[in-house]
Image (cartoon, grey):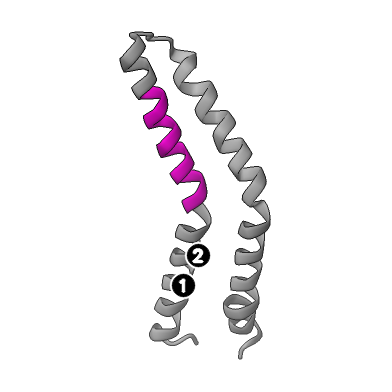
Amino acid sequence: MMDDVIFYDTLRAGLWNAVLISTPILAVALVSGLLVGLFQALTSIQEMTLTFVPKLVAILVVFWGSMGFMTETLVSFFHTRVIPLIAGG
């Protein structure tokens, strides 16, 4: 049976890894959304695809660029935390 302290510590570490993994994508979505919103406010262009397409492209570029970091972080978490718990160590 797993101790409560170990469970909550693993849960905390998993949530922290989720924050680390999602930070690059969320930061780029925020910045690109602000820039497109500012551009729309300055030019009075209210095209719906103008808000969607640049943000999607920026997110895809950052996702593609940071996949190595995301994978390395997740694999490291599983090797150091989850697999030893499953193995009983």
**Res 57 → quadrant:** top right
**Percent of width and height locating residue 60:** 61, 36
Which of the 4 quarters of the picture holds residue 15?
bottom left
Residue at left offset 59%, top offset 72%: 77
Q: Separation of disc 2 and disc 1 at Cα?
A: 6 Å
Residue 13 is marked as: 1
Residue at coordinates 47% horizontally, 16% vertically from top-left? 50
Q: Position of residue 53 (x, y in %)?
A: 54, 22
Magenta stretch holds residue 31: yes
Three-letter amino acid code at the position of disc 1: Ala
Q: For the C terminus, give its image quadrant.
A: bottom right
Q: Position of residue 45 (x, y in %)?
A: 38, 8
Q: Residue at x 36, y 23 (%)?
A: 37
Q: Is mark 2 in CB contact (under 8 Å) with mark 1?
A: yes
Element carrying mark 2: helix
Rendered location of residue 36, percent (x, y): 41, 24
Q: Residues within 10 Å of mark 2 (few under 14, many from 20)?
A: some
Region rendered in magenta: 23-37
Q: Main secondary structure of the magenta part?
A: helix
Residue, x 34% and y 23% (percent of image)? 38
Q: Which residue is mark 2?
A: 17
Amino acid at dot 2: Asn
From the viewer's perspective, is 22 left or right of 79?
Answer: left
Viewer-nearest residue: 15 or 73: 73
Tell me the crowding category of disc 1: few under 14, some 14 to 19, or many 20 or more residues within 10 angstroms, Cα based.
some
